[in-house]
Amino acid sequence: MSNRNRPSQYHHWTEVALQLGALYSLFWFAGVVLSWNALPWIQRRSLSPWWLLFPFVFPVLPSLGLTLALWRLARRAGYPTVGSALRGWLDTAVRRLLGGRTSALPPSRFVVGTTEDGRLLALERPFLDLHFLVDGKTRQGKSTLLATIAFQDASRADCAVLLLDPHAGLVDTLLAAGLADVAGDRLMVLLADQDHVPGLNLLQPLPGESP
């Protein structure tokens, strides 16, 4: 894969590494406080100095476990990343505290964005059975809307998604959002990848077929 298509994957794993590092620091701080309070007890017991490594070893498993748990919860809730899930959950909690109404969208609807007052804007899924045109000026959110629709459909197990992207920017957006984690079988033909130019011969028979 060329360098042009690598940053999306790097962004995804960078986010995972940052989340793991943040959780590790929280548990490390708790381990330092615990070790500091237990230091007199360790001295009285004449325990091994290896106990001083406790604040650094203790956070590893809890950090990994909590990161995986948050990742699974985010996927089940339909969020592309843990960061977006945390923002969504925090937004829901704030709205409930402020007396706002929050309602879960049924599976028959898909989100296309938010209104000016922050409410989700969703359409019925049969709308996708029709041909529709996304029109607008430059940098008005056309690609973002298409990426939102494609990601939600790719996350489902009952449909297939065919995405034709002439500039590969939309594909990079979906990969950065975690498409590789939520989609099942996928075939990517990147015509913009100059290092690995795909070959396509419609007349070439399949193995075992007669010409």
Image (cartoon, rainbow, N blue to C red):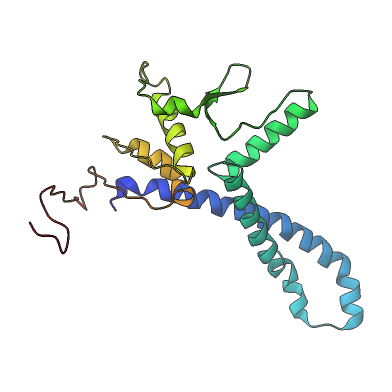
Tell whether 133 sits left or right of 62.
Answer: left
- Give x and y (percent) for residue 183: 44, 48
Q: Residue furthest front?
A: 210
Residue 210 falls in image quadrant: bottom left
Tell whether 150 sits left or right of 36.
Answer: left
Q: Does residue 16 sit above or below 117 in this rendering?
A: below
Q: Residue furthest left?
A: 211
The front one of 36 and 94 is 94
- Give x and y (percent) for residue 159: 42, 42
Q: Does residue 41 sit above or below 111 in this rendering?
A: below
The front one of 157 and 4 is 157
Q: How many marks?
A: 0
Q: Does residue 47 sit above or below 162 in this rendering?
A: below
Tell whether 7 sits left or right of 74.
Answer: left
User: Which residue is located at x 39 percent, y 42 percent?
Assistant: 160
Which image quarter holds the C terminus?
bottom left
- Give x and y (percent) for residue 181: 48, 51
The front one of 190 and 19 is 190
- Give x and y (percent) for residue 173: 41, 38
Tell whether 177 sits left or right of 62.
Answer: left
User: Which residue is located at x 43 percent, y 29 percent?
Assistant: 144
Q: Does residue 2 sit above or below 163 in this rendering?
A: below
User: Which residue is located at x 43 percent, y 52 percent?
Assistant: 184
